[in-house]
Image (spheres, rainbow, N blue to C red):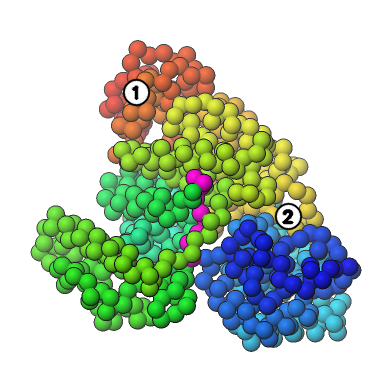
Amino acid sequence: MFTRFSMYFNNLENSNSLYLQQHATNPVHWQNWDENLLKNNITGNRLLVISIGYSSCHWCHVMEEESFEDAEVASVMNEHFISFKVDRETRPDLDSRYMSALQLMTGTGGWPLNIIALPDGTPVFGGTYFSKPDWIATLQQVSALWKKEPQQVLDYGVQMQAGMAEMIQVSLTPMKDRFRKEDFDDVVNFWMRTIDPIHGGPNGSPKFPMPSNYSFLLDYSLHSGNAAALEHTLLSLQKMALGGMYDWIHGGMTRYSTDRYWKVPHFEKMLYDNAQLLGLYARASRATKNKVFLDTAISIGDFLKNEMLLDCGLFASAIDADSPTPQNQKEEGGYYTWSADELNALSIPNRTFFNNYFDITPHSSWEGKYILHRSKPLQEVATQHKVSNTEALKWENQWKSILIDAAKKRGHSHPKPSRDPKALTNCNAMLVQGYFDMHLAAPENGFDSLALKLLDSIQGMLVKGHQVLHELNGNEGFLDDYATLGIAYLKGYALTGVEDYVNKATKLAQEIQSQFSIDGSPFYKYASESSAKWQEVIEIEDNVIPSANSFVAQFFRELAAYGGERTWAEKSSNMVRSIHGKVFKNGQNFSHWLNIALAQSYSSKEVVAIGTQSSTLLESITNSHYRPNTLYLQSPNSGTLPLTLDRNPKESTYFICSHGSCSLPTSEQQVALELWMQ
């Protein structure tokens, strides 16, 4: 029996989630996700609405304004359904479960994710954004069918459960084989049929940054010498860095581009994107010496520190796309776009050059405003205007200073978009790795300190004994929380030589093995608790964030190299072999896996620096050189790990190793470089 409180009121007011708080005043009687409420509802026999989104989602806001704030819509939902609001970042397991259902129903996905389900949570209808008329019609049609032909709806639910269980079984079915070098060529050759050769990225639109895709293509092209793949990768990274997806004034990358030119972004900024892109641009700058890549990486790092860092030392999950402007209560991109009148009121020197550089023309505005983006590199525009690069760079710095100042002055009329303060373990752990990569590219900028401070904050606030939390003051963590934190611990060791980080990583690996294992499978379940087969989440395919299982494979491989326990290497190898047959026509969906597989097919390296100057030794060769699949170890004296044990050189020394087999020691930087880059 339901209480009046649980059924007839909106119960989101006291939620810790910003997304749920945003819906707390809706007339819809939203409920927090509650397994007990579901169990009681089986006898209550009411259909469910399960609506999933996140705080910075533009179309989530649109549907809220059009439907969930509307009394007519609320009346239909409250009369016929129990309605649950779910924050996809707080409950990624539920998001994944119902996103799989939607993809099974329609072949597509996205947010807001709206599911109509049987009383026990079995999905029977789904979609993403609905207009108000379409949403009311859908609710009424499904509700009427449930009253008149309940068995038809129940039968469809049985089919959905079977279909979802089959999807899980397909995911768990290994297609084992060893990766060969020619396999990567086959994957990439098929992949290259889908690219945009002019603007980079995939052909068509929208275009997502997909960091793991470009990380794999960068590493593959450097290993294999595939010039076309390298050209496409660098073109894509440059177009992203110059386009409107990159916020030239405030820093940071937005979530994706709505057009094929990387010009018009979907304006929300996500920590998971920026954490990964930080490391990607750092590695690309080391590989190419391209200043645009390094400047972009440093700007992303500054943006994260200035805009996403919370008082507790952790980083927030997102910044909204929408914000108030003088014209609108909520305007997509309102904080980031500029009217012609605003630009004309500024004393911008060399305005003709500025207009050319930032594509300011009478016909290039978006919805009446300008998105500051660069269609060409500065040097190219300088050549067109017969201006030296030095002079052009001087102007660019002046323009940025003027626009930053103007943005601050219009803060009263264009306030910052809201920030979601949710601190997620996996995203913060990915940022540790991003800061580590930035330290290797720009060791003088203090990114090592940022990485270690963040790692301390994660350890202090998101780890409780053997348990890793998913978010600050939240529930127990998921598989990717454990795996990404394990990787972050190993980066902590690489930065300091403190072996306790490796010990902590080993304990996390053991927890993964005990909490998330599936009998007879090389893969791991996403959540530790038991569920019905159709409710399970087995995350294998990579997306904007690599899959939890590919993070585990990376973690185990790196842990074996640091700690010397070959069992972890064997588990990683078995996981990678098990996805072999899945990748050939779907390389983009397995790019993180493919990058791990590169280390098995091409030689990986370990750069070991021993001595009181070990940190300086590493920095001296990493900031201007990049070799894929390299792990870094350091110790101020002889350590206890296999690659540092009993090494007591008289002076600071390099050991260049491959799969644990090391060269003779050398204190000569050039010799170490030659051995490393072989």
Q: Does the magenta stretch mainly form a helix, a strand or a loop?
A: loop
Give 583 or 648, whichever is nearer the viewer. Answer: 648
Q: Which residue is mark 1?
A: 613
Q: Which residues are magenta?
A: 312-320
| Residue 332 x/y as whole percent | 45, 73
What residue sits right under mark 2 in the picture? 536
Residue at point 68%, 60% (across, down): 94
Name the amino acid, label 2: Glu
| Any part of residue 589 in sight | no
> In the image shown, does 53 or 490 lie closer to the viewer?
53
The relative height of residue 480 versus residue 74 in the rendered view (above or below) is above
Compared across the picture, whether 238 is left or right of 75 comes to left
The N terminus lies in quadrant: bottom right
* Residue 315, magenta (yes or no): yes
360 over 664 or under it: above or below: below
Was residue 186 drawn as part of the magenta stretch in this picture?
Answer: no
Q: Quadrant of residue 178?
A: top right
Mark 1 vs mark 2: which is more N-terminal? Answer: 2
Q: Residue at x 57, y 38 (%)?
A: 460
